[in-house]
Amino acid sequence: MPQVLEFRLPDLGEGLTEAEIVRWLVEIGDVVAIDQPVVEVETAKAMVEVPCPYGGVVTARFGEEGAELPVGAPLLTVAVGSAEASGSGASADAGSGSGSGARTGPGADGAEPSGSGNVLVGYGTGAPPVRRRRVRPEGLSASPGAPAPSRSPGPVSAPDPTPAPAARVAVARVSDGRQGPVAVVSPLVRKLARQHDLDLRQLAGSGPDGLILRADVESAIRSATSAPAVAVATAAAGSATAASVTAAPAAPAAPASPVTSVSPVTGGSSVRPAGERIPLRGVRGAVADKLSRSRREIPDATCWVDADATELMAARAAMNSVGGSGSGAGPKVSVLALLARICTAALARYPELNSTVDMEAREIVRLPEVHLGFAAQTERGLVVPVVRDAQVRNVESIGAEIARLTEAARTGTLKPAELTGGTFTLNNYGVFGVDGSTPIINHPEAAMLGVGRIVAKPWVHEGELAVRRVVQLSLTFDHRVCDGGTAGGFLRYVADCVEQPAVLLRTL
């Protein structure tokens, strides 16, 4: 008799708490093999294909395409040990000789099926067994004679979504207010609760097994803040209503007006605009959160300088002309790769800008490696891939890695690890045809170098007016890690390397 196992959305790493279903790769009734990708999801970092650690027949899917699920929420259920799954597993074993069919279902002694060999954070080999869910045999659509399910976009039937008994017990324990452990893991959630004097034992978590999420704490904060304002507004509305009934009992009906809401901060009213509303989620939501946090926490300043890039462009042309054994073939050196190499040389001279600030310990942490991020505009929004260990790479190596990461960004195949851990960011906004900008630092980094377009301008060169190729460079830096002298020295060194690339030879 087949057993039905529930596969939940795993922890995809990097502190991500939810993901949006982009595309289902299997239908109800399909036979899946161990580690076969079953759904494509979009996190705040990248697009990820999620493999299922069990082989069998898909009996239910949870969530339509476009739905957002928290980590730990059910994704699908798989009937392990059915006739179709066994046949599929036997075929796979015959082809590969790996013996994976023995893992698709329980053995004759009823042992638990083993985990997957393809491990993601939170599930797979070595993870606790997935909780089993009993489903009535007649509810399965895995029999050989059952009709194939339709691909309609309507709601998908699923087993009873009642929370597991363990989750109900955890929520009851919290809501009873008893002393004891609280179902919360994130230090950020604890810190947020402390800042607003919230007792976590009084909150019922909405996460798996009663886990208290950041959304639960923020909802409690909003409720506590808005309650006094709503009470005042209700009392005022009651007084106004009584006065209007006394003064004008037969007032004519007023035309419909825009929706008015009460501000929980000031107690005043505001009119919500009736325009199109676009949810801030996925990459756009992650960018909004990071930029807001950067403006909120980092006291930044910006300095800029114009530089004559004529010699740099000439050096690039010379490098590319001999790059392919004199034939001009092979990978070309990009301007971005040259600027990235200049940045690593400048950071070696001014390591203060390759650091981060730990405000809890009140320390500046200077980082030994340069993980260089670069801004890339894609159809999904702005992303910042990271070139690891850029300080030990030459121009060719940096250029090849930038090209690889850029292509992955455009196709949406960047991994979360390739979008995190940067220590300094290079932003080439000149590709948009603009000369200058004041970049926002990519939190928790300490600086970002912005590069405008390289354009022909009149320039005094060797005492005479000439037409030269000029670029504007701007550096936004965290004023906590250094003063203007250090930031100015860094930017001046970058400009000197742009104007005279031979300066860079001293550091190669």
Image (spheres, helix red, strand yellow):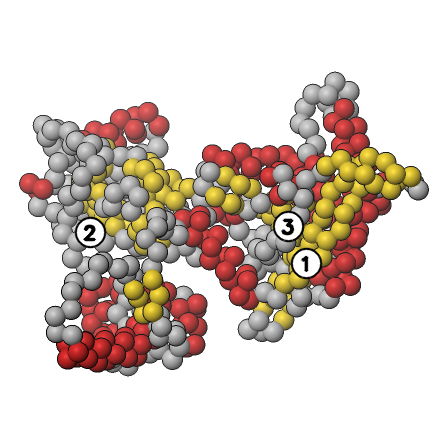
Say left or right for 365 vs 64.
right
Task: Give the position of the C terminus as an image quadrant.
Answer: top right
Q: Which residue is drawn at 56% across and 58% down?
A: 443
Mark 1 or 2: the one toward you: 1
Q: Tell me, yes or no, whether the two marked residues, 3 and 2, touch with CB atoms within 8 Å.
A: no
Q: Which residue is drawn at 39% across and 74% down?
A: 266
Q: Is residue 435 left or right of residue 269?
A: right
Image quarter where the N terminus lies is: top left
Q: Quadrant of residue 327?
A: top right
Compute the Cα span from label 1 to label 2: 57 Å
With 243 as the anchor, is 381 left or right in this view?
right
Residue labelled with disc 1: 302
Instruction: Give the class, few, some or many, for how many residues have Cα within 10 Å of label 3's Cα (few <14, many ≥20).
Output: some
Q: Earlier in the sequence, mark 3 or mark 2?
A: 2
- Give 498 or 74, whichever is nearer the viewer: 498
* Residue type beneath disc 2: Arg
Residue 236: horizontal and vertical position, in percent?
Answer: 25, 79
